[in-house]
Amino acid sequence: DLSCTDCIGTTEISDVYLLNTGDAGVGAYTFSGGIFSVNDSSNFATNINTGNSTGAVSIGNSAAGAVTIASDANSTFTVTSGDLTLSTVTSGTLALASAGAATLDAVTSLSIDVTGATGASNISVAADNDAEDLTISVTGSAGDLILSSADAGSFTTSGALTLTAAATSVW
């Protein structure tokens, strides 16, 4: 029997429960047993590990289903120090796709390595007019362009092939 006018108001339960709005919690929380939505159908930012937080952010595990990150705005994924690794560990394809231009910039070096290849590896441009060239170059005052193969090498073109060297060359 309750005989009070405000028996379970915010004053009485403030240190026991998280309120629907305007409340903050400190400590570890576990929510399980169903779908958990944060900022569902709202226009507010969702912040995870902001401020002075130094802990890791984990999403999913090895048994989890697909992980989707979606946005309709310019988005940035930044690692301020350390490495950023995108990988498929045991199988699958890592696919990077862009409906527009794609830029990959590296400050000190860039390696694209295919190890254990069982099929052809290609860098290509699907061109349908003359302005869509594939350029592989070394710019600046130093550096060599090295094309090598452990098997036969070939240059195939439906037009003219020009090899030009500004210094002494061996062909």
Image: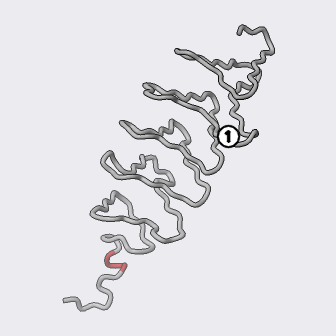
Q: Residue 34 versus residue 29: which sits nearer the camera?
A: 34
Instruction: Say which amino acid is labelled 1.
Output: Ala
Which quadrant does the C terminus fall into?
top right
Q: Residue at x 36, y 70 (%)?
A: 18
Q: Residue at x 36, y 79 (%)?
A: 11
Q: How is the image coloured?
A: secondary structure
Drawn side of residue 168 relative to residue 52, left or right: right
Drawn side of residue 162 relative to residue 53, left or right: right
Residue furthest toward the front? 158
Q: Residue 3 versus residue 134: which sits nearer the camera?
A: 134
Which quadrant does the N terminus fall into?
bottom left
- Vertically, is 41 above or below 166? below
Residue furthest toward the left? 1
Other residues around mark 1 within 10 Å, as few (<14) / some (14–19) / many (≥20): few
In the rendered image, residue 79, in percent from the top left (x then y), is placed at 54, 42
- Vertically, is 132 above or below 110? below
In the rendered image, residue 122, in percent from the top left (x then y), is placed at 56, 31
Query: Which element is circle 1 on?
Result: loop
Q: How many marks?
A: 1
Q: Residue 18 versus residue 118: which sits nearer the camera?
A: 118
In the rendered image, residue 17, in percent from the top left (x then y), is placed at 32, 71
Q: Residue at x 74, y 28 (%)?
A: 159
The image quadrant of residue 33 is bottom left
Drawn side of residue 39 relative to residue 137, left or right: left
Q: Which residue is mark 1?
A: 127
In the rendered image, residue 104, in percent from the top left (x then y), is placed at 62, 38
Q: Residue at x 75, y 9 (%)?
A: 169
